[in-house]
Structure formats: structure tokens, C-alpha cells
């Protein structure tokens, strides 16, 4: 299966106070850590205010959600990637997980099969729908849900066939899935959680 790597970097980062994609961790922006973990070519989904900032950082594959779904969250980003990039499956990662490792993403991709619609990580007892692989056949489901303004990822997962992979079964550390929401979270990762 041909994977398309999708980095979701379009959140408003209200609690963090600035775009999280560009927050620094060990001298590199969060999004670059995530991009590195994904390996291969990555398409970045963001919003119009950040497009130039990504391009000024040398990124060429940066797009924003398509109309009429702009500002509709992660589901719109995943749908847009499916609409704009031709692939068999879409490896999705949120830009606020700078501790994620390439081995984890590689193991996640290897877990995808034709029999399942999605493979989603479970870490620390929590489902991580933004560390996942989604099959292209889900595009109509995403479209329908977006048209009905049903934007919860949990509702989407309830409608499809998901294989849940527990982080420890693929050798992933629980800390990899810690997403940074507030500036104080930076201190937590510096302290090793």
C-alpha cells in the first residue's frame, strides 16, 4: 500500500499561546521532530495564517483545508489530504508530539492491512486517533461526517473498522504520545515526564 504521510499542524493552539508547530524542543520546532519520525515525504496540513511561515522554513508540501471544511479540525485535515494526495493509506500525526519516534510510526504502518479501515495507537489507556493510519476507502465516511458537522474523532472511529494497537506491543514508550498543550508541558518533557 502506498502511504501518504500527513502532519496535522492547523490547530489554533489557544492554551499554548502560540502555534505549537513552531514551538522549540531541543533546538528544533515540534513539527520537524514529527516530520522526522514519519520518514519519507510529508504533507503538512495547516491554516492560512501559517502557510507562509512553513514555506519560509523551506517546506514545499503545505496545504490548507479545502472549502467548505476550513476550520473543521482534524477530520477536515485528513479528508483534505485524501482529496489532494493520491495514496492507499494516510499516516496521520499531530504536530504536538515531539517525542514520537520513527520506529513507532514504522511499526504502526506495518500493522495496516486491507482488512481494516484504520490502525490507531492506544497509549496510557487512551486512544490516540492522531497517531494512526487511515485507509483511503474512508474518504466518503469523512465527507458525510463533515457535511453533517459531526467533528468528533470518537464518532468517526465508532463508524469504521479499527485495529487498536497498544503502544507497548510495538515497543513504543508511553512518553512518545504526550501531547504538548500548555507551556508548562515543556517542563514536563524536559524533566522526563
Image (spheres, rainbow, N blue to C red):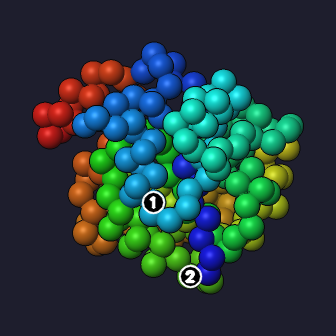
Of the pair 43 and 141, the residue shown nearer to us: 43
Residue 96 in which image quadrant: top left
Image height of 94 relative to 2, above or below? above
* Residue situated furthest left in the rendering: 191
**Numbered disc in front, either 2 or 1:** 1
Q: Where is residue 176 in the image (x, y as percent from the top left)?
A: 30, 51
Q: How many neighbours does mark 2 have within 10 angstroms: few (below 14), some (14-19), or many (20 or more)?
A: some
Q: Position of residue 144 (x, y in %)?
A: 83, 52
Q: Quadrant of residue 110?
A: bottom left
On the rendered image, what quadrant is the C terminus found in? top left
The residue beneath circle 1 is: 38
Marks 1 and 2: in contact by CB < 8 Å? no
Left-right relation of 73 to 20 = right
- In the picture, measured across the screen, residue 142 lies left or right of residue 192, that is right
Mark 1 Cα within 10 Å, few/some/many (few <14, many 20+)?
A: many
Q: Does the rendering let one see residue 127?
A: no
Q: In this view, does 125 lie to the left or right of 80?
A: left
Residue under the point 69% across and 70% down: 87
Q: What element carries label 2?
A: loop
Q: Which residue is drawn at 50% across and 52% down?
A: 93
Q: Label 1's element?
A: helix
Label whose residue precedes the other's in the sequence (2 or 1): 1
> Can you tell which mark lies on residue 70?
none
User: How many numbered tags mark residues here?
Assistant: 2
- Residue 107 placed where, x, y %? 38, 73
Any part of residue 114 in sight: yes
- Give how far across and how far down residue 142 sits, in percent: 75, 54
Distance (Cα) linking label 2 and label 1? 18 Å
- Residue at 42% across, 49% down: 34
Q: In the picture, residue 81 is in which quadrant?
A: bottom right
Residue annotated with mark 2:
113
Q: In this view, does 92 lie to the left or right of 149?
A: left
Amino acid at each position: 500500500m502506498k502511504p501518504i504521510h500527513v502532519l496535522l499542524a492547523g490547530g489554533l493552539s489557544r492554551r499554548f499561546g502560540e502555534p505549537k508547530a513552531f514551538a522549540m524542543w531541543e533546538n528544533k520546532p515540534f513539527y520537524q521532530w514529527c516530520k522526522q519520525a514519519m520518514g519519507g515525504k510529508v504533507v503538512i496540513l495547516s491554516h492560512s495564517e501559517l502557510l507562509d511561515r512553513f514555506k519560509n522554513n523551506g517546506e514545499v508540501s503545505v496545504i490548507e483545508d479545502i472549502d467548505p471544511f476550513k476550520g473543521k479540525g482534524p477530520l477536515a485535515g485528513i479528508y483534505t489530504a485524501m482529496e489532494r494526495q493520491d495514496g492507499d493509506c494516510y499516516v496521520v500525526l499531530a504536530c504536538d508530539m515531539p517525542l514520537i519516534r520513527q520506529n513507532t510510526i514504522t511499526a504502526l504502518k506495518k500493522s495496516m492491512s486491507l482488512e481494516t479501515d484504520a490502525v490507531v495507537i492506544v497509549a496510557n489507556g487512551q486512544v490516540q486517533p492522531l497517531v494512526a493510519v487511515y485507509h483511503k476507502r474512508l474518504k466518503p465516511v469523512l465527507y458525510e461526517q463533515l457535511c453533517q458537522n459531526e467533528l468528533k474523532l470518537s464518532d468517526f472511529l465508532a463508524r469504521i473498522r479499527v485495529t487498536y494497537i497498544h503502544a507497548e506491543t510495538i515497543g513504543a514508550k508511553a512518553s512518545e504520545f504526550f501531547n504538548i498543550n500548555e507551556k508548562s508541558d515543556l517542563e514536563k518533557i524536559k524533566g522526563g515526564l
